[in-house]
Image (tube, grey):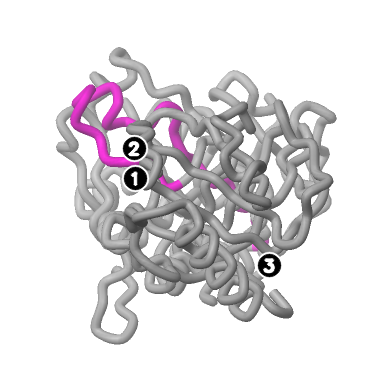
Amino acid sequence: MAGLDHECPSRALSFGERGEVHGVQHWYGLEDVPASWGACVVTVGVFDGVHRGHQLIVSHACDAARALRLPVVVITFDPHPDEVVRPGTHPPFLCTARRRAELLAGLGVDAVCVLPFSYEFSQLGPDEFVRLVLADRLHAARVVVGENFRFGHRAAGDVALLNQLGEKYNFTADGVPLLVADGVTISSSYIRERLAAGDVAAAALALGRPHRVDGVVVRGHRRGHALGFPTANLETPPHTAIPADGVYAGWLSSLALDGSTDERWPAAISIGTNPTFEAGDRTVEAYALDRDDLDLYGAHVAVDFAARLRATLKFDSVSELVVQMHRDVDDARLLTAGG
């Protein structure tokens, strides 16, 4: 997929130990940027989901960096700007802030800078934003953004204004056209729509990888264990983009403290309210295929969705449910074979 295997050039830079992971600098706030940091290529965006369109923007930034022989810095925000600007109206988030930073770092850039997004920050005008962030601190020589990029108070700035301000602050700016694949404009909104419809396969195509939901394993009603299918019941972060109710094939992974994968198992995943038992609470539960020996309580895990198997159904009896669960497991095994 676009940008996944594209690596940026990297000069011999004097990176400090602070926040460096696998050669990529991780900064939280402008104060973390080393005082010795020189000119660079910068790309800016929320990048929720780090989908193929976002990957294309970063790839263009890498191409610009190769031509200029400069490092690349990705700027993103935490919390999501909509949480601050329009609290209570923001969309479900396709990934956590940490996952977003990890994915961006994996695109071959030199640094990821996460800017704390506060009410005060949201009040910066376009000129102030460019001066404080892009010019004074990062010394941007070139800025690469999506063609629909907006910035500054009330989203007053656009790519045209960014170019004008670039003349003032000595950088050039590029607006990358939105990615269109098979007649579909790839966007975070489109992916959320597909997830809300349960179409995790289309979401995966747009993302360039399966959609992931992560969280901490908590104790549930333990019905799955009693039925022979012990599940990991996830407590997910608020506002997580969870696919529509249904049963899915995918993978369950246990995660290390740094977010990397410890172990990974093919899984059958259930999302819904367990209508056969009239439980009421919506849950995300994953059964690692053919494993009844896992103790994951309290562990940080991730569920990656490959395909939707069926809708959530209410069965007339528990025995009917168990028969269907065996079918679901068989289907999940086929769909995840070799994955």
Toward which corner of the image does residue 70 lie, by quadrant?
bottom right
Q: Which residues are magenta?
A: 69-94
Question: First in sequence: mark 3 or mark 2?
Answer: 3
76 inside magenta stretch: yes
> What is the distance, in whole Å, between disc 3 and disc 2 at their CAs?
51 Å
The residue under label 1 is 275
Classify residue 127 as left or right of residue 269. left
Classify residue 327 as left or right of residue 93. right
Residue 53, horizontal then vertical, whole percent: 40, 66
Query: Residue at the location (34% across, 29% down)?
Result: 129
Q: Could you classify mark 2 by the number of other residues whose Cα lies within 10 Å: few (under 14), some (14-19), or many (20 or more)?
A: few
Query: Residue at the location (39% across, 23% down)?
Result: 117
The residue under label 3 is 7
Decide which of 290, 241 is in the foreground and name it: 290
Residues under numbered marks 3 and 1 in contact, where contact means CB atoms less than 8 Å apart:
no
Residues under numbered marks 1 and 2 in contact, where contact means CB atoms less than 8 Å apart:
yes
Classify residue 154 as left or right of residue 311. left
Residue 275, horizontal then vertical, whole percent: 34, 45
Toward which corner of the image does residue 121 lie, by quadrant?
top left
| Residue 100 in view in this figure | no
Going by the numbered disc 2, the residue's amino acid type is Glu
Query: Dot 3: what SS?
Result: loop
Classify residue 218 as left or right of residue 203. right
Query: Dot 1: what SS?
Result: loop
